[in-house]
Image: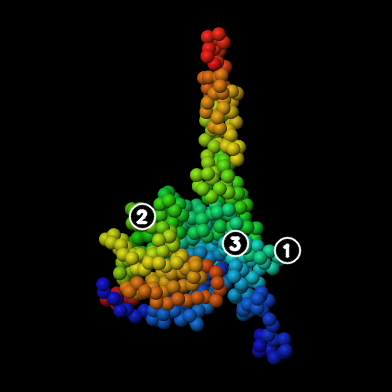
Amino acid sequence: NALIGTPDDCQPCPCPDRSSCAQIAQTGQVVCTNCPAGQTGIHCQMCDDGYYGDPLGTSGTARPCVRCNCNGNVDFNSVGTCDHATGRCLKCLGHTEGEHCQHCQRGYYGNALNQTASQKCKPCSCSTAGTSGHANECHPQTGNCHCLSHVTGRDCSHCEVGFFNLQPGLGCERCKCNPIGSLS
Amino acid sequence: RPRPDVTLPPGTHLLFAQSGRVEHVPLDGYDMKKNDAKPVLHLPGKVIIGVAFDCVEKMIYWTEITSPSISKASVDGGEPTAVIRSDLESPEGIAIDHLSRTMFWTDSMRDRIEVASLDGSQRRVLVDNDLVNPRAIIADPENGNLYWADWNRDAPKIETSYMDGSNRRVLVKDNLGLPNGLTYDYRSSLLCWADAGTHKLECVNPGRGDRSTVLEGIRYPFGITTVGKNIFYTDWQRDSVVGVDRYTGEESDEFHPQKRTRPYGITTAYAQCLSGQNYCSVN
């Protein structure tokens, strides 16, 4: 307040890079009005939408505001794609999930980091007949479903060699071929 | 095409959101008085997306996504008041019907369009199917229509319905990319949109269905609003508000706020409500 008449009337703004500030008349609170790029908050202590970090180190080591890292699994036309402090991605697409959309969702398998949509996260779609678990339970990377005894295939859809008659909940039966009359 | 030579009522200004602030830019005729731009709302750490203005009570309404909510405050300053705080995930577009005292908004995570009284009461879901990324929403209370855009990358579209959600129809679905912003001009009965995918400003007469391009080659529009013969839009790559003459299709003005960050929603605030006096007095 320049009107008091003491040498300390005007103080530097508590804002990074000598950016401007304003004092709120009612409360006397000083608010930074032009934070550096990517930064926001009363003292520019937070990151703007689309960025994350802790630029002033208010909760530990200072981390500059950097762009959200969601492994290409958020749409750049979205708003609010990551948490401004932790960087946790909030709008993962393509059946991905995780802090940085780096995993496939439950019920999907593949490589969440693959940029080709068809190679990304595919549904487990386990065969209901040949699976001992749920149709959407499979290995997150390989996609292998939990097969009943003597059932095989990624999705447990057919019998092992030497077995036949896939029955839901039971699995496959051994072929009872006479070794003498069989070719295999 | 006729060029309506209307004088804007004094006191018309633009309101746009940027980095937790709503900035106020007075208009002098069709030019932005950039030196007189000032923030009317400063909510550090918040992310304001949509902005709407109630010309009756001179209140700004906005959507905010960090603690998803819809709030209001007087355009002359004053404490913000939350009107909707629950059951929101990513509220983005907001529109006001100043005649029936209601507001409409889109939520791009709940994939819904909702309506409530301006005080937050009588909340109701209007549309909750066939929406993927609903964003912009516009009310035309004079004719009882609602318009919204869905930037779904697989099937972007601009839709309309009556203000109770009935008679829903797709208005535009061909040659759309990312229709982020919508605006309706009462005088010309044109619905215009800004598309960040096709990089075009286009308009359609919702009754007749004829479509025309205002300007091509724009960068990355987000919000859009109409003021007489001009369109103003916010741009994510230029970090500015750009003015375009709708009739010549030429860029007429640009405002670069000091803050270099993405601007979001934009709306026009008239000193008086356009209906009645202003709407008829120009004819």
Viewer-side residue, B39 vs A17: A17
Disc 1, SS: loop
Please say whether residue A94 is visible from this viewpoint: yes
10 Å crowding of disc 1: few (<14), some (14-19), many (20+): few
Alpha-carbon distance for marks 1 and 3? 18 Å
What residue would you read off at disc 3?
A: A67
Give me the residue at 35% from left, 64% from top. B202
Disc 2 residue crowd, few under 14, some 14–19, many 20+, Cα 10 Å: some
C-alpha span from label 3 to label 2: 32 Å
- Residue pointed to by mark 2: B173
Observer-nearest residue: A90 or B144?
A90
Query: Which residue is more in the foreground, B220 or B105?
Result: B220
Query: What amino acid type is highlighted by mark number 3?
Result: Arg
Residue B227 seen from this side: no
- Where B67 sits versus A116, above or below? below
- The picture quadrant where one finds residue A36 is bottom right
Tag 3 subunit: A
N-terminal label among 1 and 3: 1
Q: Is residue B156 left or right of residue B1?
A: right
Nearest to viewer (mark 1 / mark 3)? 3
Which mark's residue is nearer the viewer, 3 or 2? 3
* Rendering coords of residue A1 (x, y %): 66, 85
Badge 3: few (under 14), some or many (20 or more) residues near its Cα, within 10 Å?
some
Residue B97 against residue B28 in the figure, above or below: above
